[in-house]
Amino acid sequence: MIRATVIALAALLLALPGCASVDVSPASGPPAPAPRPTYTVGHQWVRTDGVWELVYTLENAYVFHSLGRDAITLGRDLTPWSVERRSGSLAPPLARPFEFYPPPRLDWPLQVGKRGSSTGSWNFWYDETVMLPVPGAPGRYYQRTYSFRKLVDATFAWTVEAYERVKVPAGTFDAYRLYFTLTPDDPKERDAPKWWLRTWYAPTIRQLVAAQGKNADALEFRLAAADPGLTEPLQVILRDPADGLRLSRHETTLTGRVTAGKGLARVLVAVNGAEVWRREEPGTPTETTLEVPLKLQDGRNVVIVTGTDTAGETRQEARTVVYDATVTRAAAQTARAEVRAAREAAVRADAARRAADLWREAVVAEQTAEAALAGGEAGRAEEAFRRSHERYDRAAAAAAFAARQEQATAEVREAAARFDGPVPMPHRLI
């Protein structure tokens, strides 16, 4: 049944227009995230020249076959590797009109302005026309063209030129436009053909939707239908905090991401039923990153993230986090006792006079901690007590150093007062 449907679709595609200029316009919104896609055997690339099916994968490549057994090999980064013609009247020596190895690498995720290059071997065909004498007719000649295969070292350069809206028979998509060129490394090379290729990659369906170029053969195409299995499902993926985590502080950070191939309409974060964060961005992005600070109540806290796509579908993911305030209060009380001991040591060192700046910082931090503790914010109080403790310790050390300097200065002055004459110089031993 599936094969019959594919054959019928392939017949219909023959009536569609070929690779005229790609119809582009400004994108409908900001560039969407574009991580590198992955495909599995059986995936169908439904193009205006027929249906190409992924028949097998290599460690660094995908191999697609048409119904006529022609083959296109793309690198895992969706860069061109080779085109192989197995159907039609081409003789076996001419069955591979394009080949570049190793397959070029792209820097995913795609972003406008990214660029790069790689070197490899470019295998191409070129024609040479010669004049040959006509047998049995002296002085008469005829032309004959021979095709030769040549392998040269070349540089494959790529650029992510733009993010724009592209219209193809399969529909209209916001897509990244990539530009590829091949240049022989030897500037004296004259047989290599002019070669370039532009491709359009649509993140929402995770697929190349169009390509046009020069001497690109079957690499040029328009997408006729999108494989519905490629549209990334609505997902809520949470990284932190872990479910069931117990904390001694009343604050934590929620991290993760929400994705939707159809586009995200809304993302909400709620703690114990109360909404604490919302994002509704224009342009229906396909992914949003979560990094949301959360304030927790004493005891059990239920954090729920809700994602809604443009089709109205909703997904939720929940985390339970326990804030144990008794542990936090005990830690704050311990820190408070340590601050008092540090303050007494600083008082004995006369830090208020000898290290006035550090003393003031310590006092302010201690007052902040006491206010937080009185307000029930034990976690914040503990942090402030720790800060005050550190300042008191530094103040005491600075005061002790100042005291030693004062003592040394006093001893020098006392010695000078006891001595009435010039300071005697020591005798040199000869």
Image (tube, grey):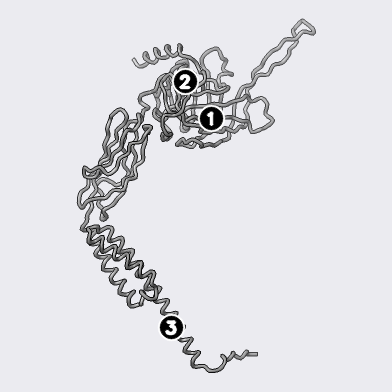
The residue where tag 1 is placed is 179
Say few, some or many: other residues with alpha carbon within 10 Å of mark 2 (under 14 / 14 to 19 / 20 or more). Answer: many
State how far apart marks 1 and 3 are (Cα): 76 Å
Q: Which mark is residue 407?
A: 3
Give x and y (percent) for residue 378. Answer: 25, 59
Q: Is the N terminus in the top left, top right, bottom left or bottom right quadrant?
A: top left
Q: Which element carries disc 3, helix, strand or loop? A: helix
Residue drawn at x 34%, y 70% is 392
Q: Is residue 248 left or right of residue 74?
A: left
The residue where tag 2 is placed is 222
Q: Nearer the viewer, mark 1 or mark 3?
A: 3
Q: Earlier in the sequence, mark 3 or mark 2?
A: 2
Residue furthest to the right in view is 139
Q: Earlier in the sequence, mark 1 or mark 3?
A: 1
Q: Which element carries disc 2, helix, strand or loop? A: strand
Give x and y (percent) for residue 376. Answer: 22, 58
Q: Nearer the viewer, mark 3 or mark 2?
A: 3
Q: Is residue 198 left or right of residue 230?
A: right
Out of 146 and 24, give the one closest to the viewer.
24
